[in-house]
Image (cartoon, rainbow, N blue to C red):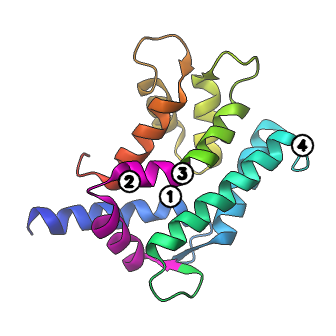
Amino acid sequence: MDAEDLYQRRVAARFGAFDQDGNGHISREDFTTAATRVLAEFGTPFRSDRGQAVSGGAEAFWQGLAGIADVDGDQRVSRGEFAHGAVKRLRDNPDRFAEIARPFLRAVLALADPDGSGAETTGVARALRALGVEADAAERAAKSLDPEGTGRVAEKEAVTAFARYFVTKEP
């Protein structure tokens, strides 16, 4: 297996992070489920300003992903479409992926920021767990976004790390 095949397999495996219901494709419903889970974790009503920001961010993220990867236009992204879209369209420009994810990530980080001083690492870990990340991995990921040990996660670092995870060759 060459490096490109390995990379495509890695990206395809990351598909599962988006396929919230595990039915083998990513759809708008998966993004709605993700938003609902995060809002429930933080006890945030859907109809609140923060709830609407998370919901709207999830919808924007879905629209961006579908626009990049839904090749056949069926409003679902298959594992193959995801791998192809991420590999062929985003690898050379991870900032593009970061920008389609930013509204959702910004809204989720706001939930983890109770006092306006930055998203707390514990809140980021809670959000990741709500999205299906195992507890230990969620804790490690949140702490890795806080290299100075302040207990806070900045949006720029979170968005950059998210994009890097999904579309670069780095492990």
Disc 1 + disc 2, Cβ < 8 Å: yes
Q: Is the residue 27 above or below the residue 34 in the image?
A: below
Question: Is 66 situated left or right of 38 in this image?
Answer: left
Q: Earlier in the sequence, mark 2 or mark 3?
A: 3
How much space separates mark 1 and mark 4, taking CA atoms? 26 Å
Q: Label for residue 17?
A: 1
Residue with the mark numbered 2: 166
Q: Label for residue 48?
A: 4
Label 2: how many residues lie within 10 Å, few (<14), some (14-19) or many (20+)? Answer: many
Q: Amino acid at mark 3?
A: Ala
How much space separates mark 4 and mark 2, taking CA atoms? 30 Å
Q: Which residues are magenta?
A: 77-101
Q: What kind of element bears circle 1?
A: helix
User: Of helix, strand and loop, which mostly describes the magenta segment?
Assistant: helix
Q: Nearer the viewer, mark 1 or mark 4?
A: 4
- Is residue 31 located in the magenta-colored stretch of the structure? no
Residue 64 position, x and y percent, is 54, 64
Q: Earlier in the sequence, mark 3 or mark 4?
A: 4
Residue 44 visible, this angle: no
Disc 2 + disc 3, Cβ < 8 Å: no
Residue at screen point 53% across, 55% down: 100
Residue 160 position, x and y percent, is 41, 38
Residue 85 position, x and y percent, is 37, 71
Q: What kind of element bears circle 4?
A: loop
Residue with the mark numbered 3: 101
Q: Nearer the viewer, mark 1 or mark 2?
A: 2
The image shows a total of numbered marks equal to: 4
How much space separates mark 1 and mark 2, taking CA atoms? 10 Å
How much space separates mark 3 and mark 4, taking CA atoms? 21 Å
Q: Amino acid at mark 4?
A: Ser
Q: Residue furthest left?
A: 2
Residue at screen point 82% across, 45% down: 51
